Amino acid sequence: MLEFIVSKYNFWIYIILMMIGFYAMIAKRNLVKKIIGMNIFQTAIILFFISTAYKTGGATLPILLDPHGHGHGAAESAVAVSQYINPLPHVLMLTAIVVMVATLGVALAIVIMIYRKYGTLNEDEIIKAMK
Amino acid sequence: MRFISFIVTVLTGALLIYGTVDMPNWGDPNSPASKHVSPRYITKTEIETATPNMVTSVLADYRGYDTLGETTVIFTAGMSCILLLRRRKKKKAR
Amino acid sequence: MIFRKDDIIVNTISRILIPFIQLYALYVIMHGHYSPGGGFQGGVILGASMVLLLLTRGYDEAKYKFPEQIATLFSSVGVLIYAGIGLLCLFVLGNFLDYGKLAALLNVTPSHARSLGILGVEIGVGFAVMSVMYSIFLDISTGGVLPEDEEE
């Protein structure tokens, strides 16, 4: 039982963080608070992906420790796969972080336009004004 | 309304926590995510691309088309910010 | 709207720090093959130095260092560099973004040609990310209302 908790608890922490962002997205009435909730949600997703890349047993970050020879074909000594953590989630999340900042900018621009038109950021008042 | 939101949040969280029971253990070297394509990236990056940093070689070479799409997304976000917000004061009439 | 503050500490520190931040950003882009770094990270650091210039000096002075028209131009030039390297690989009978075929043009081994292709692509990404970060910050902080030169 203890082993089960130790091997899974980081996923539970990310799910709790994700649900905090989800609650802010669906329950808050202010549009800026909804955007903050969306960012907390995306941060939880990024932490989840990064944690799946980890390998126990002394694996280090995905940069070759001893880059000798610079690619002269088959004379290379073999690289142990278990020595380096999985590089693929790092690549996907590296681009996701920058796209997250760009979408945050677009969302704030849309919020500024809504405030200029309706004079409020409260969702109920905006829906009332639209009718 | 706020109470219904809280109930929905708790139910979704419980469902996701139930889903983690089938996830591989944290740091398992034999998990499916570490077995499919990443051994190829780790062993061949020095031979094929002469780049010790695997993140850079996967980002720009093995998955370069994906990164081209991401760069286009960032470019589109910048353009849409300009189109949404930027207004110039009118120059004086000539 | 951001105006210049006459605070001697802020002005002096920003004047000292901005060149070093930009030099470090270029190092991060260029050394991305051997250490953590690359186009996205270096581009964001370079954009942060431009944002620091805008915050401390105000829009009226930052306009002469890095005008917003140049930012718009650079963001499209970055994507153009990326797609142009991919198209260059098509012209030497390879696949799209297959840098190994550039070895005949660059007169190096195919693995080194891939390394150089990665470097060119990262420079394009750095251009795009830098100018888009600066452009988004400029638009949101000013609300989009840029004062045009009144005297004509």
Image (cartoon, coloured by chain):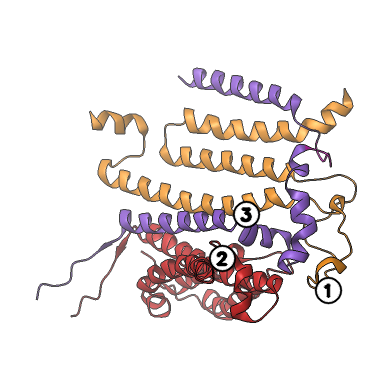
> In the current view of this chain or complex, which residue is farthest to the front?
C93
**Which residue, given by chain and number where applicable, does mark 1 sit on?**
A69
| Corner quadrant of residue A71 | bottom right
* A116 vs A81, nearest the viewer: A81
Identify the subunit bearing mark 2. C
Which percent across, then down, holds residue B87? 26, 61
Query: Which chain did the renderer colour red?
Result: C
| Corner quadrant of residue B35 | top right
User: Are there few (<14), some (14-19), or many (20+) residues within 10 Å of tag 1?
Assistant: few
Which label number is shown at residue A27?
Answer: none
User: Are there few (<14), some (14-19), or many (20+) residues within 10 Å of tag 3?
Assistant: some
Q: Is residue C77 left or right of residue A65?
A: left
**Which residue, given by chain and number where applicable, does mark 2 sit on?**
C94
**Mark 2: secondary structure:** loop
Question: Does mark 3 fall on the same chain as mark 1?
Answer: yes
Identify the subunit bearing mark 1. A
Q: Earlier in the sequence, mark 1 or mark 3?
A: 1
Which region is colored magenta?
A: B26-31
**Which residue, given by chain and number where applicable, does mark 3 sit on?**
A94
Q: Colour of chain A?
A: orange
**Mark 3: secondary structure:** helix
